[in-house]
């Protein structure tokens, strides 16, 4: 999910690809933002990438 967010893929497209609801994707991305202390989902994805999580 964060890899897709890093590329700027819309929530609806991520949801369709992963067979999840858009709300679930938003919740997961929000959680990732909080856990990485980021401001945006792209920033959270970059932090995760830089830390070797992706």
Image (tube, grey):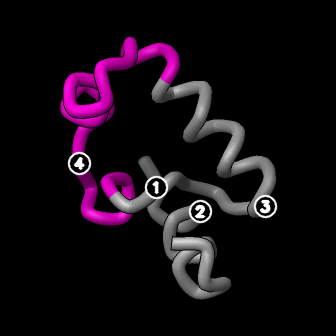
- For residue 31, what is the image quadrant? top right
Mark 2 neighbour density, 10 Å: few (under 14) some (14–19) many (20 or more)? many
Query: Where does the image place residue 37, in percent across and percent down from the top left?
Result: 78, 61
Mark nearer the N terminus (3 vs 4): 4
The reply to whether the magenta stretch includes residue 20 is: yes
Asked if residue 5 lies left or right of residue 46, the reply is left
Magenta highlight range: 4-24
Q: Main secondary structure of the magenta part?
A: helix
Mark number displayed over residue 2: 1
The residue lying toward the viewer, choosing from 22 and 38, is 22
Contact check, label 4 and label 2, Cβ < 8 Å: no
Asked if residue 13 lies left or right of residue 49, the reply is left
Residue 50 to residue 27: above or below: below
Viewer-side label of 1, 2: 1
Identify the residue shown where x is 27% and y is 56%.
8
Identify the residue shown where x is 51% and y is 65%.
45
Element under disc 3: loop
Spatial CA distance of label 4 from label 2 is 14 Å
Spatial CA distance of label 3 from label 1 is 14 Å
Mark nearer the N terminus (4 vs 2): 4
Mark number displayed over residue 9: 4
Query: Where does the image place residue 17, in percent across and percent down from the top left?
Result: 21, 32
Query: Where does the image place residue 20, in percent across and percent down from the top left?
Result: 38, 18
Viewer-side label of 4, 1: 1
Mark 3, residue position: 37
């Amino acid at each position: 999910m964060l890899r897709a967010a890093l590329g700027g893929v819309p929530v609806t497209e991520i949801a369709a690809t992963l067979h999840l609801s858009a709300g679930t994707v938003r919740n997961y991305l929000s959680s990732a933002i909080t856990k990485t202390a980021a401001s945006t989902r792209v920033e959270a994805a970059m932090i995760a990438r830089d830390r070797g999580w992706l």
